[in-house]
Amino acid sequence: MAGDDGVVVSVAERVRRGLDDASAGERLVARALLANYPAAGLETASRLAERAGVSAPTVVRFTARLGFPGYRAFQQALREEIEARRASPLTLGRHAAEGSLRVAAAEVYRQRMDETFAALSDPELDRVTDLLSDPARRVTSVGGRYSHILAEYLDLHLRLLRPGTRVLDPRPEAMGAACVDAGRKDVVVVFDYRRYQRDIVSFARAAHARGAKVVLFTDPWLSPAADSAELVIPARVEAPSPFDSLVPAMALVETVVARVTARLGQDRLRRIEEISGDVTID
């Protein structure tokens, strides 16, 4: 559904955005929903209320706060999200663009970029920057089958700017070792988009359980790893082809890199100079 600014916002993202202004009871409903999203929202209002430890009217007020005219409309939106989550190249490729693909693609990418950046707030960008710029924290980036490209791209920049960064080998033994070693001084940057990978979600949850701060880059429907994330940065993925696009997500990564670069100031310049060999190291 569309937000007040006309940008399409998933139910999950709408719930997360509304947490700060919600009542204590509504926050309990939100957390119960996000802890088992979206399945918990497909239960009756009474059952969701029981999960959250509140009354059924509190659940109804909660869905009204989200902008739904009733609980049925809320559940219908969740069902539509489930269909969107399950979309694949087989289902997305049924309707070919008419006319010039060049013109159609340009319009699609402009719209998706606008929607993606409208969903990113300055405070969120600052919080990501704080975590990635802190030299006392080790930064580990990991992604799925396709999104691992984004993890590598982020790390290629971060390693020029600061020490203590790495891209995680997605093999089970490497991820298991990383979980064992994770702690409160770790930041884990996870990239996970629809048709979410169970191993990536499990790793994010395990790292969170050991005290690491998880930053999740995902789509508007939210990877299940969102329930373990300190920050969630969604990007639109729809493309003028049967395959999801990483273009808006890449733009977000480059924006984060630009912000971290500015934050680190002269320290990053000296590091880049030393790495490039422009400065003689005794």
Image (spheres, rainbow, N blue to C red):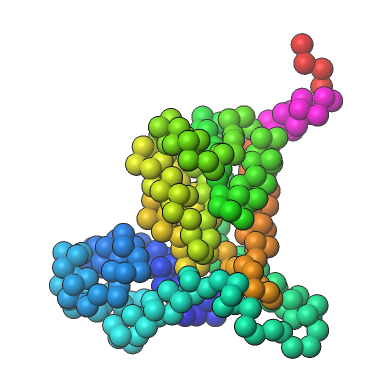
Q: How far from the left and from the top, in percent, is residue 194?
A: 51, 64
Residue shown at the point (56%, 39%) measured from the top left? 168
**Is residue 177 highlighted in magenta?**
no
- Quadrant in the rendering for residue 66: bottom left
Q: Nearer the viewer, residue 223 or 173?
A: 173
User: Furthest-front residue in view?
Assistant: 90
Q: How far from the left and from the top, in percent, is residue 94?
A: 62, 83
Determine if residue 105 is in view: yes
Q: Nearer the viewer, residue 34 or 67?
A: 34
Q: Nearer the viewer, residue 101 or 187?
A: 101
**Is residue 273 highlighted in magenta?**
yes
Using the image, determine if residue 120 lies above or below residue 191: below
Q: Which residues are magenta?
A: 266-278
Determine if residue 4 is in view: no
Q: How far from the left and from the top, in percent, is residue 117?
A: 61, 65
Using the image, determine if residue 195 lies above or below residue 77: above
Mark count:
0
Q: Please name the predominant secondary structure of the magenta segment in the image.
A: helix
User: Furthest-right residue in view?
Assistant: 278
Q: How far from the left and from the top, in percent, is residue 254?
A: 68, 52
- Quadrant in the rendering for residue 134: top right
Residue shown at the point (53%, 61%) measured from the top left? 193
Residue shown at the point (58%, 53%) measured from the top left? 145
User: Furthest-top residue in view?
Assistant: 282
Is residue 246 rendered to the left or right of residue 177? right
Residue shown at the point (48%, 36%) measured from the top left? 173
**Which quadrant holds the C terminus?**
top right
Is residue 46 rendered to the left or right of residue 116? left
